[in-house]
């Protein structure tokens, strides 16, 4: 109950939160109103009590200890007594634990004693330089390929195909989305282009729905189902692309025979396709060999001064950077830069503006906003004038301090993550440094490292810092973007790091930043160590444990996924530049090109019946079919043969396989002893069973992972014939210096040992490749999902346009115009009037004073955005042309200011668009 103004009673129920001015039933007072004096007395009493307890703290602690001590001592004695009673049980538990441990130890010791011989054999195999034949025989079974091996190879091939297909699909979607950006930008200028935007949107949605993937998987219509003659052509193309893939000099020379714009397109499509975007170790190894050969060729033939690598735009460097920014490289850049870039973007309080004029203008604007009066300070000033104001200097110093702090974070992220840098990029940096040093031996170490820094930092990392949204470094939602302040902050950091990486100080127009020069010099020393260490990498042969003979011993054939159009274009380019890239008549490339003959058309490549000759859209159908991707299983035309003059390495591979077959079935301590001892009937029988078993496994093996015929042709030979063949091969190998009879041919046994060791490594790497391919595919799917989100965003935008921009003069849905709708009337101008307006600039072979005799009639057609223009001279109709507003807008976008009509009339594009807008759309 509360009494208000000493006249009114107010009742409040503290449980139900109800209130009333009327006395409730069963009312009773639960709270007593207290006065100010009551409060003062209560608080004072609490304060006095608190002071009393504080003054007696020591006494209270002694009292507490005295009162609780007996209780604690009683609990301690009870616990001690309990443990004393359990001593016997504790001893039993300890005995059991120690006994169990001893039992396990003795079990392991016995196992070691039982297998000590096997352990020694493993040590012999792994650690010995010359392991004996008896040791090798125990482990040759590891070279057999199991069903699991074949399954994993097939899974790798499947994932690789998905990755390559997804990369190409994403690249096409990205191009179409960029075009959509342009079209929507043009739409903002001219509503009439909405129909074209809708058309492009439908195309995007079809691709989002999987049309591209269906197109890419039409092998049943393509070359895989062709006749015997075209199958032969297919095999020759497989041999051709194998030769191009494994001999990088051909493509390295071809790249520099084409104009740069054409070679760039060739690299972005055919070359990366040929190497499957380096989706496995073999293809990465071969692609790096191509990069190396091409870079050395470019430096040798096109670089005349050291600085040209920095100031120019070398083709190979551009190709290397483009590759390492691809699907795999983006993950690396994300790991390297995403955390620190995201931190910069998310720091809303971070302001970095090192432009004194901009800082000055922002300060003046702030003054006017605060005072509400126009500032008497001039708005347009020079850098020197802006710096005369202490406020500007203070803001600039604060920005520089922020810049140094943030730059340090990015620098530490880069320097501490050297291992994240792609191996391929580091290797090319090493090749670049060595090649420049070889051509310019007088170049200093600093100059060489600056060139390495130009590749690693400026070309690879810098753009990703400046525009992280453009390089997929950070996740952006559809329609989201980085604001101007965030962009300026990132640009400022990138600028400082760029200066530091090239050891360039702030001078001249950047003199106001000279206080950072010491920081730049210190940062350069950090970068210098980083660039030097980045070049310290193994050669690809050591890194991937591969050489040019690796294909002869791998389980599966190499496979690429390439479109018919790319096959035909590559064939055409090879023929066009054949004299340069294969100058010798005996060159293998010349033989293959001669077998293929002239460049086929898409129709002849696919064969009769692929396209209906009466199809009115035959050209479009062929164009669509040319994008069809087929899988080529690459094979070498020049496999190993017995009668060939080989270099020894190839013959050794065949001989090793024969030796493995022999030592499996015939005992002996020395290879020479086995070869000289005749095989028994039982040994021949066992060997025959082994070969039958192998043939059965081979028959179940999918075609794409079968070994080549030359590797299997000796399998059916009897044991004795294999031994005689081994002896002949060993004599040949001894003549080439690969083996020696003096050490009982131990060299070839050591090679077999190496194969056994490498087989385990290969299986381990294959599992890692499976995981990496799956990770890459997941990343590509995420990117595709982002593109789909953008497509949906554009769909929403276009629907809004349809709702808001409908005009009677525009047929948005292509339906007939409703009755009563009037079409815009034709517009007539004389040439003189158009010249006066600035639309017409001139007419060939006609003087200005004759322009009054020429008239132009402009009429809108039934097709949206299409206009008929008729010209008349002295009333006589001369010619008619059609104008497409979309074409005009494209010209305007590309910066084309003047165009010709009727091949002789020059018009201003911008003013012509303005005229059409004004007369036909009221804009």
Image (cartoon, grey):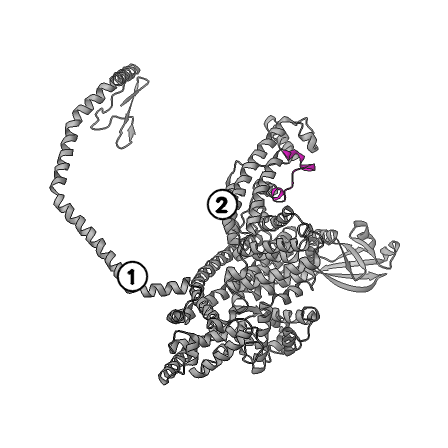
Question: What's the mark number on residue 112?
Answer: 1
Residue 1 image offset from top left, x and y in percent: 26, 23
Residue 70 image offset from top left, x and y in percent: 14, 28
Label 1: how many Cα within 10 Å (few below 14, some 14–19, many 20+): few
Q: Is residue 9 visible?
A: yes
Identify the residue at the far front of this view: 742
Residue under label 2, please give it.
339
Front residue of 260 and 467: 260
User: Under tag 1, what secondary structure?
Assistant: helix
Q: Please provide the residue range marked out in magenta.
A: 498-514
Residue 695 figure quarter: bottom left
Looking at the image, is mark 2 or mark 1 earlier in the sequence? 1
Q: Is 659 colored magenta in this rendering?
A: no
Q: Is 501 colored magenta in this rendering?
A: yes
Question: Is most of the magenta stretch helix, strand or loop?
Answer: helix
User: Under tag 2, what secondary structure?
Assistant: helix
Question: Is 155 left or right of 464, judged from the image as shown?
Answer: left
In whole angstroms, how far apart are the C-alphas of marks 2 and 1?
Answer: 50 Å
Residue drawn at x 82%, y 61% is 872
């Amino acid at each position: 109950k509360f009494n208000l103004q000493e006249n009114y009673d107010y009742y409040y129920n503290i449980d139900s939160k109800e209130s009333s001015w009327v006395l409730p039933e069963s009312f009773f007072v639960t709270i007593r109103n207290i006065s100010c004096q009551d409060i003062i007395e209560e608080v004072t009493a609490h304060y006095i009590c608190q002071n009393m307890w504080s003054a007696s703290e020591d006494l209270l602690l002694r009292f507490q200890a005295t009162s609780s001590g007996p209780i604690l001592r009683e609990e301690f004695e009870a616990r001690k007594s309990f443990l004393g009673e359990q001593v016997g049980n504790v001893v039993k538990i300890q005995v059991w634990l120690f006994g169990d441990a001893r039992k396990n130890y003795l079990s392991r010791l016995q196992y070691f004693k039982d297998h000590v011989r096997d352990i020694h054999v493993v040590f012999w195999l792994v650690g010995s330089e010359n392991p004996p034949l008896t040791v090798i025989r125990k482990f040759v079974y590891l070279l057999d390929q199991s069903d699991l091996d074949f399954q994993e190879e097939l899974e790798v091939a499947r994932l690789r195909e998905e990755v390559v297909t997804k990369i190409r699909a994403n690249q096409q979607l990205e191009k179409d989305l960029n075009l959509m950006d342009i079209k929507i930008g043009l739409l903002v200028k001219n509503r009439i282009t909405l129909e074209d935007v809708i058309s492009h949107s439908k195309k995007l949605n079809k691709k989002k729905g999987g049309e591209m993937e269906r197109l890419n998987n039409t092998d049943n219509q393509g070359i895989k189902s062709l006749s015997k003659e075209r199958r032969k052509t297919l095999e020759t193309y497989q041999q051709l692309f194998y030769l191009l893939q494994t001999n990088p000099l051909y493509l390295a020379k071809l790249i520099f025979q084409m104009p740069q714009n054409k070679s760039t397109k060739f690299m972005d499509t055919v070359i990366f396709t040929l190497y499957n975007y380096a989706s496995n170790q073999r293809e990465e190894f071969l692609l790096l060999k191509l990069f190396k050969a091409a870079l050395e060729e470019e430096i040798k033939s096109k670089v005349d001064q050291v600085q040209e690598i920095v100031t120019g735009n070398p083709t190979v460097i551009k190709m290397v950077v483009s590759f390492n920014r691809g699907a795999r490289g983006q993950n690396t850049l994300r790991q390297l830069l995403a955390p620190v870039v995201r931190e910069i973007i998310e720091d809303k309080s971070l302001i970095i503006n090192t432009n004194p004029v901009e800082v000055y203008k922002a300060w003046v604007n702030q003054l006017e906003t605060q005072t509400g009066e126009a500032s008497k300070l001039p708005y347009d000033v020079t850098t020197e004038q802006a710096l005369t104001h202490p406020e500007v200097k203070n803001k600039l110093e604060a920005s520089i301090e922020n810049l140094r702090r943030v730059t340090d974070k990015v620098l530490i992220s880069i320097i501490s993550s050297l291992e994240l840098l792609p191996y391929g990029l580091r290797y090319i940096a090493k090749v670049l440094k060595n090649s420049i040093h070889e051509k310019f031996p007088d170049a200093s170490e600093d100059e060489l490292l600056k060139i390495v820094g130009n590749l690693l930092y400026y070309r690879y990392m810098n753009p990703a810092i400046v525009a992280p949204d453009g390089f997929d470094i950070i996740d952006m939602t559809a329609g989201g973007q980085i604001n101007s302040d965030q962009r300026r902050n990132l640009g400022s950091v990138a600028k400082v790091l760029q200066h530091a990486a090239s050891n360039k100080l702030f001078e001249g127009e950047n003199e106001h930043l000279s206080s950072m020069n010491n920081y730049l010099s210190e940062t350069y020393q950090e970068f210098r160590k980083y660039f030097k260490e980045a070049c310290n990498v193994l050669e690809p042969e050591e890194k991937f444990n591969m050489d040019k003979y690796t294909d002869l011993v791998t389980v599966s054939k190499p496979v690429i996924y390439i479109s018919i159009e790319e096959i035909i274009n590559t064939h055409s380019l090879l023929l066009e530049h054949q004299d340069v890239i294969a100058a010798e008549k005996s060159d293998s490339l010349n033989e293959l090109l001669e077998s293929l003959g002239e460049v086929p058309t898409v129709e002849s490549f696919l064969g009769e019946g692929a396209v209906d000759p009466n199809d009115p859209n035959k050209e479009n159908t062929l164009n669509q079919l040319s994008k069809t991707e087929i899988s080529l299983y690459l094979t070498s035309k020049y496999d190993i043969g017995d009668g060939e003059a080989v270099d020894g390495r190839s013959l050794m591979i065949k001989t090793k396989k024969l030796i493995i077959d022999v030592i499996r079935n015939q005992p002996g301590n020395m290879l020479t002893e086995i070869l000289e001892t005749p095989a028994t009937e039982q040994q021949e029988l066992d060997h025959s069973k082994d070969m039958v078993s192998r043939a059965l496994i081979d028959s179940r093996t999918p075609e794409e992972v079968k070994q080549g015929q030359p590797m299997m042709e000796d399998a059916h030979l009897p044991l004795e014939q294999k031994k005689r063949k081994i002896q002949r091969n060993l004599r040949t190998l001894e003549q080439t210096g690969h083996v020696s009879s003096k050490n009982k041919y131990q060299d070839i046994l050591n090679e077999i040992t190496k194969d056994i060791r490498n087989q385990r490594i290969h299986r381990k790497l294959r599992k890692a490749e499976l995981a990496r391919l799956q990770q890459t595919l997941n990343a590509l799917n995420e990117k595709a999902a982002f593109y789909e989100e953008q497509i949906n965003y554009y769909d929403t935008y276009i629907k809004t346009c349809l709702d808001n921009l409908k005009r009677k003069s525009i047929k948005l849905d292509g339906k007939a115009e409703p009755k009563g709708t009037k079409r815009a009337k034709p517009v007539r101008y004389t040439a003189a009037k158009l010249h006066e307006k600035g639309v017409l600039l001139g007419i060939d072979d006609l003087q200005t004073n004759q322009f009054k005799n020429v008239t132009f009639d402009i009429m809108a057609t039934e097709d949206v955005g299409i206009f008929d223009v008729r010209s008349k001279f002295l009333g006589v109709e001369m010619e008619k042309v059609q104008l497409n507003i979309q074409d005009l807008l494209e010209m305007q976008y590309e910066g084309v200011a003047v165009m010709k009509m009727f091949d002789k009339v020059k018009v201003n594009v911008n003013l012509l668009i303005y005229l059409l807008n004004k007369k036909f759309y009221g804009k």
